[in-house]
Image: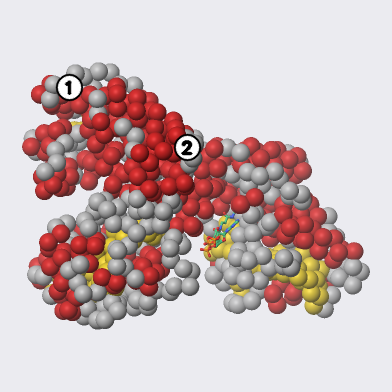
Amino acid sequence: MEERALLSVTVEDRVAVLRIANPPVNALSAALRAALRDAVAQAVADQGIQAIVLAASGRTFVAGADISEFGKPPISPSLPDVLVAMDECPKPLVAAISGAALGGGLELALGCDARVASSGVKLGLPEVKLGILPGAGGTQRLPRLIGAAAALEMAASGEPVTAETALSLGIVDEVVAGDPLPAALRRARALAEGGQRPQRLRDGRERLGPRDAFEAAAAKVLRRAPDNPAVASIVESVRSAYDLPFDEAMSQTRAMFLRLVQDDRSKALRHVFFAERAAQQPAGLSREVRGRAVSHVAVIGAGTMGGGIAMSFANAGIPVTLIEAEPEALERGLQRIAQNYATSVQRGSLAAEERDRRLARIGGGVGLENAAGADLVVEAVFEDLALKQKLFAQLDGIARPGAVLATNTSYLDVDAIAGATRRPDDVLGMHFFSPANVMKLLEVVRGAGTSPETLATAVELGRRLGKVPVVVGVCHGFVGNRMLARRTAQAERLLLEGALPEQVDAALVAFGFRMGPFAMADLAGLDIGWRIRKATGKTAPVADALCEAGRLGQKTGKGYYDYGGGGRQGVPDPAVRDLIEATSARLGIARRAIGQEEVTERLILPMIDEGARILEEGIAARPGDVDVVWLHGYNWPAWRGGPMYHGSRLGPAYVAQRLEAYAGQSGDPSLHPSAALRRLAREGRDFDALSGTAR
Ligand code: T1G
């Protein structure tokens, strides 16, 4: 295969322009690093060259190291080696930055004597989000440029800054509209006229700033991320800018980098990075298929979900009409939206002008005929199949031809809803998670008749909303809620068998979740599940007993915990222990002490088993898709990669064996491993062997 040029060199009036070209994001692969090192050496040797400009083609400057190389044997030259070559260059270097300079891309730019950025650029050190630290000088050069405290904040948060912020911080010397190359060339020539290269960042400490300011920033950063090894390493590495010579600090940092990149957390975070991107390309949908244009949306139902969904569209700049059957319900919905925005403005997270712009995009209408002009209609009415079918039948005759008709149902049969229309190819599910204007996950439920264009429309729209769309198939609860039901059932069983709410919640928090199932139930309200169980003839003895006793959670001041008549921090309630013990006795279940390992495994392993069944049925196309659902819909701890990644690390055989043991010990037949899991265990294969394509 013809070796694609990763770097082109042109000379513009004695300035060598090294233009990187490694699509899609100019990641610093081994070959590119070698090409950079060689091109700098050639420019140094060429007497006709007085300065060097680093530029890039394509949509971005440099997105950092090539993450796909991590975990494999390092290939020389490393990126620090390239930076050494730049340090040893006697001629001035200037970076011309467009798009994004992230991680190693920013470190490359910091190896230059000046940086010109086009407006709209993103600059940052996101390594911490991959469980590692900037390994090519970011923790040494950036502190010497903008101060150690500010550099620490950037590296520890991993959040990028805009070109304008970078200018004010001093990361870039100039921001231009459009192509940064001309300004970079001018700067390179001006620096060359000085006859020698200016002082390199590595040689000065005068801009580090006061040590106590750094230590205060370090304490804050460590408080924010108490048990994060990458953050701790970043603090230590930036601190060494005060205490160690540059080269010594760099070799210490390199050692930390190599240690972190081998850590399980970093491996899990890298899995998440690639799984999120793979999920963006639904299996079975060709990259050539484009969605339809959506410039106006109608949302049916102005309740909590409908309001949140309408806000999602308005926040993304898309005009939306919120529709209700009654004026009073519509007014209540619009009021709730205005209140939500007002709260954000009061908290300072939303500027008043932006609030006004978003509110102006949300119209209201009474009656379905207000949906006639919409390109997409999202239904968010009560979770009742007959009601939804009736509504879709009406919409079928009102919505314009080609409009996408989406249901926000969280578990009902999308095919049955589509069957109420004459256009099943335009129908699918768009399952938003509450609060819909906040939660990132969007389950795009592909019906049997959903056309590729309709599917592509919903996926592209999900990304336009800033959400993480994952295509799933039709079944009760799709992917997320179907797996959650397994965890909820075991949480209830554990109470009956001897555990208490605080023990179960503590186990899940220790695993890495922010909240346990019972604290979450109290927050959401126990009546929601109670109503669904009654509608579907299911029971959950403890939860039902709490609801019958009027303990619906925080909203009533008591649920699984006692909230002292207000507030959000509940405490264990002896009355709940008594209720649980009485329920166990009534059901003839002998209570026993249950260890934390059993609690944790009985909450987590059944979810993995359900994920295996979901993959075997083709409801999800890849194990990574299931992980993305749980990462962005249920706050699965990212440093554990996701339920299927976790299962893969434990091994299907271990998961099956433990489930079999718990089934025997507890007498709960639902714990027996599925045929899919047992087959993987028998054949020694992993979860990706189950991947079908979502129906
Ligand atoms: N390495 C390898 N592949 C990458 C990549 C990277 N750094 N960044 C993106 N890709 C792939 C991605 O998987 C996808 O592939 C395609 O490019 C488009 O990505 C030494 C050690 C730059 C803001 O963490 O934040 O530098 O799915 O869909 O939405 O200290 O990509 O098409 O096959 O995200 O336009 C630090 C990661 C690395 C930046 C563009 N850098 N990338 O967003 O495109 S560690 C990062 C991003 C490091 C140094 C350390 C985004 C983007 P495919 P995309 P996008």
Question: Does mark 1 have its CB less than 8 Å from ligand 1?
Answer: no
280 vs 2, left or right, is left
Depicted 27 relative to depicted 630: above or below = below
Pointer 1 residue = 589
322 vs 86, left or right, is left
What SS does tag 1 mark?
loop
Q: Image point 29% across, 72% down: which residue?
A: 426
Question: Which amino acid lies under the numbered mark 2 shown in the image of this protein?
Answer: Glu
Quarter occupied by residue 393:
bottom left
Quarter occupied by residue 121:
bottom right
Can you give x and y, in whole percent of width and height, for residue 551 in the image? 13, 37
Can you give x and y, in whole percent of width and height, for residue 467 in the image? 39, 60
Closer to the camera, 309 or 537? 537
100 vs 613, left or right, is right
Can you give x and y, in whole percent of width and height, for residue 664 in the image? 29, 23
Can you give x and y, in whole percent of width and height, for residue 417 in the image? 20, 64
Q: Assess disc 2: are there few (<14), some (14-19) or many (≥20) residues with their C-alpha within 10 Å of its C-alpha.
A: few
In the rendered image, the quadrant that contains the C terminus is: bottom left
Which mark lies nearer to you, 2 or 1? Answer: 2
Quarter occupied by residue 290:
bottom left
Pointer 2 residue = 683
Depicted 366 relative to depicted 534: above or below = below
Question: Which amino acid lies under the numbered mark 1 shown in the image of this protein?
Answer: Ile
Q: Image point 16% across, 36% down: which residue?
A: 540
Going from N to C along the chain, the mark reached first, 2 or 1, is 1
Q: Is residue 651 visible?
A: yes
In the rendered image, the quadrant that contains the N terminus is: bottom right
